[in-house]
Image (cartoon, rainbow, N blue to C red):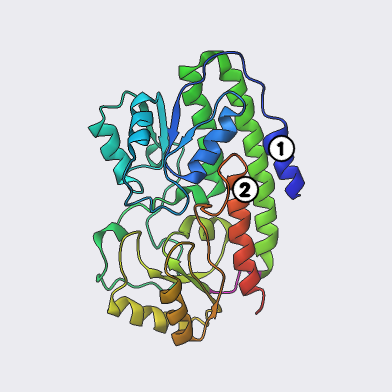
Amino acid sequence: MRRLFTALLLGTLGQPVLAEAPKVITDISPIHSLASMVMGNVGEPVLLLPSGADPHNFQLRPSQARALSEAKLVFWVGPELSPWLERGLEGLGAQARSVPLLEAEVTMTQAFDAQQEGHGHDHDHAHDHEGIDPHAWLDPENARNWLDLMAQELALLDPANAATYAANAATGKAGIDAAEAQVTALLAPVKDRPFAVFHDAYGYFTGHFGLRSLGSLRQGDAALPGAAHIKELEETLKAGAALCLFPEANHGADAAAQMAEATGLRLGNALDPEGSALPPGPALYGKMMLGLATTIAACLGQG
């Protein structure tokens, strides 16, 4: 199945018409991966956020600012995730067409906590935990919808390659279908086993695949956990008989280990919701989703 996904994604991308590709900018690796699928051999989008960098607090380098000022099209999650990019677009007077994906009509969004059980609201956390959860790429339905949207946006700027972009989007969606089937199979035996995560970033993933997340150590993307929340979470995890607690790549290993020890949970391997450990490119999205499923299933599968 993994070979099928790679073949669908890389082996049958449409061949480009000989025309200059639009200069495309993306913010984070999953969005860059989707844009790479659609562009195929026509061109290569630019990824602004380097591996391991925090998407909430990032400073553009001069070369990146220059690339942004010269871009024709910017695909990004939106200011909810990458406020620095919004400031960059405004400050540079960029002429690029900006496409914040969270604002697209095809995007299914939800609030933080929407897929977590037993979560109360003690209000000792930062305001950024309110409102729309920006991690919408973790729902494969959004990813498929965004491929079509990207193909349409690229075709407006580059009509000579419109058919290629549409064909590449179709191939990309078939690849995501294959990855989704693998994820579903991996998670099926552990769907009803409760767990917790370091960071409230997985609502789209747990909701789509029907998993039981009881809560997160850190609420939102910039909020540090308050004492009241930590106490409440400990009580929730013990009462809910959670099995595993998952730290996150580049964040929170010590805090997650302390919580696991306090609650008696098994400490799982780190989740990587942005594919930060993977090489950028069209294959990253599917590998990222499979990585999340493999990590979750490996810990919960121990019973």
The image shows residue 23 at horizontal and vertical percentages of: 45, 25
Quarter of the image for residue 163 reads top right
Q: Callout 1, which amino acid?
A: Leu
Q: From the viewer's perspective, is residue 173 above or below residue 122?
A: above
**Left or right: where does residue 296 sit relative to residue 103?**
right
**Which quadrant of the rendered structure holds the C terminus?**
bottom right
Quarter of the image for residue 161 reads top right
The image shows residue 178 at horizontal and vertical percentages of: 69, 46
191 in the magenta segment? yes
The image shows residue 102 at horizontal and vertical percentages of: 39, 42
Q: Earlier in the sequence, mark 2 or mark 1?
A: 1
Q: Callout 2, which amino acid?
A: Gly
- What SS does tag 1 mark? helix
Q: Is residue 109 visible?
A: yes
**Residue bearing the label numbered 2:** 286
Q: Main secondary structure of the magenta part?
A: loop
Q: Which residues are magenta?
A: 190-194
